[in-house]
């Protein structure tokens, strides 16, 4: 029998569970026993008559900081209750940016303990000595870590074997390769004069696969060129990428501002469009593409600087306007 994956949130608001994890394919998987979502109320570990979990920061400053004792006792109880090998993960602006590869990694584990901070953050001693990992969703501030934790759990849970009806669909989703997903269409074949691409109606699976790969490259180049910065393209992908650049260069027109009228269009040379050209040698085909994509980064293998992303209020002055609830 398949072992149930267990996910536990440490939060001041246990009513958020299961939230989005209780609906759709993930919710149905929980009903079948493949997944279990629960919450541990941090207020139960609070101190004194009012169950306090926060206090003013040493050294002064606005806002409140979550106290170490209630939080650590909750973490210790969670470790004792959860399967061995379930890491304690804190949603934190200091955390590693969450991405699909991390979701796959976490989906292999028997469980996760998600610590959801509030106020100006948590006591540093908890972060240093009682948390296994810190994750972040992005460069924005939330009122607490609950929304970020639930987003991560949804991304992780759907990768657990048996959760999705068609396991192959995972392989075709955005970010499985360093590309966005190709465009999707369904019935009717003609909607308000807008047709479905003929290739999708052809029944030729080889042509469909190639079209989808080319359109995935096109969508990524136009909307998320940063994903291509470390792309290790296959020979087929390099050839299709060059074709997409040439097509965009011949059809895309930059806005007609006075400054842009004088911007020269750089046409790809035959060498640049050579299928054997390495990924990092393929330039953006025109100035208009650069403007559209915010300057496609060079396709190099060099590691980019880690961006410090923020998912919850922290002890930084930038977030000091968030007060205790």
Image: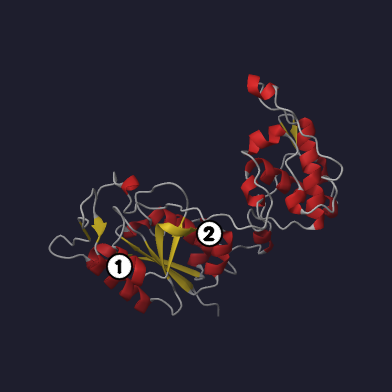
Residue closest to the eye, 207 or 239: 239
Give above or below for 209 relative to 183: below
Q: Residue furthest left?
A: 49
Q: Position of residue 265 (x, y in %)?
A: 75, 30
Return the x and y of residue 135 as percentages of the image width and height: 45, 60
Percent x, y for residue 236? Answer: 82, 55
Label 1 environment density (alpha carbons within 10 Å; few <14, some 14–19, many ≥20): few
Horizontally, residue 39 falls left or right of residue 205, namely left
User: Residue 244, position in %: x, y?
Assistant: 78, 42
| Above-or-below relation of 282 to 101 | above
**Circle 1 sits in a helix, a strand or a loop, which is it?**
helix
**Image side of residue 174 versus residue 194, left or right:** left
Q: Nearer the viewer, mark 2 or mark 1?
A: 1
Residue at the spot x=49%, y=68% of the render? 35
Q: CA separation, marks 2 and 1?
A: 29 Å
| 258 shown above or below 228 | above
Q: Nearer the viewer, residue 139 or 205?
A: 139
Q: Quadrant of the N terminus?
A: bottom right
Q: Residue 130: in sight, yes or no?
A: no
Element class at badge 2: helix
List the residue tagged with mark 2. Answer: 155
Q: Is residue 54 left or right of residue 232?
A: left
Q: Point out which mark residue 125 bears.
A: 1
- Is the residue 201 above or below the residue 278 in the image? above
Q: Which of pointers 2 and 1 lies earlier in the amino acid sequence?
A: 1
When asked about the image quadrant of residue 221, the answer is: top right
Sort mark 2 into few (<14), some (14-19) or many (20+) by Cα contacts within 10 Å.
many
């Amino acid at each position: 029998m398949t072992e149930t994956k267990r996910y536990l949130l440490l939060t001041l608001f246990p009513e958020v569970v299961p939230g989005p994890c209780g609906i759709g394919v993930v919710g149905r998987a929980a009903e079948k026993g493949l997944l279990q979502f629960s919450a541990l109320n941090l207020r139960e570990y609070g101190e004194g008559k009012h169950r306090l979990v926060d206090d003013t920061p040493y050294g002064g400053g606005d806002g409140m900081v979550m106290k170490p004792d209630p939080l650590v006792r909750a973490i210790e109880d969670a470790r004792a209750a959860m399967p061995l090998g379930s890491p304690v993960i804190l949603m934190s602006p200091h955390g590693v940016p969450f991405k699909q590869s991390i979701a796959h990694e976490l989906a292999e584990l028997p469980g996760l303990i998600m610590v959801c901070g509030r106020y100006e953050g948590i006591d540093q001693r908890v972060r240093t000595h009682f948390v296994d990992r810190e994750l972040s969703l992005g460069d924005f501030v939330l009122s607490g870590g609950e929304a970020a934790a639930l987003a991560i759990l949804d991304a992780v849970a759907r990768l657990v074997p048996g959760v999705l009806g068609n396991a192959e669909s995972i392989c075709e989703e955005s970010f499985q390769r360093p590309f966005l997903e190709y465009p999707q269409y369904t019935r009717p074949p003609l909607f308000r004069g807008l047709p479905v691409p003929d290739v999708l109606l052809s029944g030729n699976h080889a042509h469909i696969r190639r079209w989808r790969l080319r359109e995935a490259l096109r969508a990524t180049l136009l909307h998320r060129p940063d994903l291509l910065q470390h792309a290790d393209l296959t020979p087929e992908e390099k050839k299709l990428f060059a074709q997409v650049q040439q097509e965009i260069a011949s059809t895309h027109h930059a806005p007609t501002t006075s400054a842009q009228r004088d911007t020269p269009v750089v046409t790809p040379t035959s060498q640049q469009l050579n299928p054997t050209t390495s990924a990092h040698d393929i330039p953006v085909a025109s100035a208009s593409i650069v403007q559209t994509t915010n300057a496609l980064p060079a396709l190099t293998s060099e590691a980019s600087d880690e961006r410090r992303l923020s998912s919850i209020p922290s002890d930084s002055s930038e977030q000091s306007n968030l007060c205790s609830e």
